[in-house]
Image (cartoon, rainbow, N blue to C red):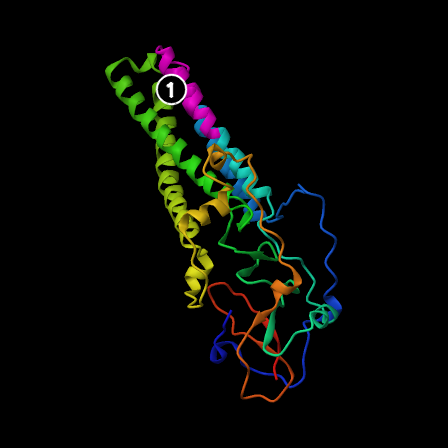
């Protein structure tokens, strides 16, 4: 990976300074497979609870206001099964997106001893995050909410109370897709219900009073329309990011760095699993997780600094306002 010296190498210190090594402790041993990941963020937890409440409200209105009072049993059974299956898949995808490690980088490994053990050669560099004291692999970014560096971080979503990264992007895409589908389904059923009630007696098309029925249906219609637009846009954005192999943060930064461009279908297979199958739409199916970067993957190659005669320098990269992410770079130059 080639970096622009004019952009990255500033404020060169003649004496190497490590990022508070007394606070950088070796990373703990990885937990057992399946260990639950949960972010203790008040705003994110509140948004996740609101998400579940809105889905359950839609479930209540669809079942007890529109379907159960209907005298067309075939219509009620078919739509009831379809809506409940989509709602279950949406909530399951939400749980998987919220409770899955999005790809957190080991915390606390940017110690002086560990960096020296990498035995950097002339022209090699490692990125150190001063916030979580970790060495960042390529395409990793620090999240101020999760307080961790996340591999291929797209963005932090408060609605799932988690970052969207390389390990849980599939579940987030499924969540947006199923929410959009149940929103569209609810809008269609509300439209048919209004037409039926206008042609028939309002007292016979719901077990609630006519004013209560109208209020519940209008609220559901407003909720479904709002979330249909929002989740459809998010779904399209995520699919575009997967196909172009460019995260939301990378798109905001507009990096002009050479990177291997592979076919779009391969990007989809990396995100959703192997060859196309129904498991792509199954939130309980875990895609093939990428291997954790080895020590050699943490080292990057940069052009030699011809304007310096030091053999060990520490530089600080200028922070970007879009991500508020500051990196420190350890360089070995001839």
Asked if the stretch drawn in magenta spans residue 67, the answer is: yes
Comparing 91 with 1, the one in front is: 1
Q: What range of the chain is rendered magenta?
A: 61-87
Residue 328 drawn in magenta: no
Q: Nearer the viewer, residue 256 or 258?
A: 258
Q: How busy is the neighbourhood of tag 1: few (under 14 within 10 Å), some, or many (20 plus)?
A: many
Q: Give residue 73's position: percent from left, percent from top.
A: 38, 11
What's the magenta bit mostly, secondary-structure-wise?
Answer: helix
Residue under numbered circle 1: 66
Residue at 39% in and 39% down? 227
When the figure is inspected, residue 37 is found, relative to residue 325, above or below; the finding is above
Name the residue rendered at 56%, 47% in the picture: 167
Marks counted in the figure total: 1
Percent x, y of residue 251: 42, 60
Residue 256: name its quadrant: bottom left
Left/right of residue 219 with respect to residue 306 in the rendered view: left
Residue drawn at (59%, 52%), measured in percent from left and top? 103
Left/right placement of residue 246 relative to residue 94 reads: left
- On screen, residue 310 above or below 148: below
Mark 1: secondary structure: helix
């Amino acid at each position: 990976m080639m970096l622009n010296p004019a952009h990255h190498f500033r404020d060169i210190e003649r004496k190497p300074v490590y990022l508070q090594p007394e606070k950088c402790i070796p990373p703990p041993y990885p937990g057992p497979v399946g260990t639950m990941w949960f972010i203790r963020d008040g705003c994110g937890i509140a948004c996740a609870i609101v998400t579940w409440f809105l889905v359950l409200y839609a479930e209540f209105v669809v079942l007890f206001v529109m379907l159960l009072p209907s005298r067309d049993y075939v219509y009620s059974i078919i739509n009831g099964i379809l809506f409940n299956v989509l709602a279950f898949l949406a909530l399951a995808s939400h749980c998987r997106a919220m409770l899955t490690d999005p790809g957190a980088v080991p915390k606390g490994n940017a110690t002086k001893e560990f960096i020296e053990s990498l035995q950097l050669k002339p022209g090699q560099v490692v990125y150190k995050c001063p916030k979580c004291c970790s060495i960042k692999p390529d395409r990793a970014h620090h999240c101020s909410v999760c307080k961790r560096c996340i591999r291929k971080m797209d963005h932090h979503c408060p609605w799932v109370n988690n970052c969207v990264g390389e390990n849980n992007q599939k579940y987030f895409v499924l969540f947006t897709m199923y929410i959009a589908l149940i929103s569209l389904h609810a809008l269609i059923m509300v439209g048919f219900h209004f037409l039926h009630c206008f042609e028939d007696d309002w007292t016979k098309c719901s077990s609630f009073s006519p004013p209560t029925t109208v209020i519940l249906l209008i609220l559901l219609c407003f909720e479904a329309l709002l979330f249909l637009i929002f989740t459809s846009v998010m779904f399209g954005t995520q699919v575009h990011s997967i196909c172009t192999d460019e995260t939301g943060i990378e798109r905001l930064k507009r990096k002009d760095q050479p990177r291997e461009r592979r076919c779009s279908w391969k990007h989809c297979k990396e995100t959703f699993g192997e060859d196309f199958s129904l498991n792509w739409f199954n939130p309980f199916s875990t895609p093939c997780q990428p291997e954790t970067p080895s020590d050699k993957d943490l080292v990057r190659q940069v052009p030699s600094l011809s304007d310096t005669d030091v053999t060990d320098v520490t530089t600080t990269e200028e922070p970007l306002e879009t991500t508020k992410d500051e990196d420190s770079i350890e360089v070995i130059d001839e």
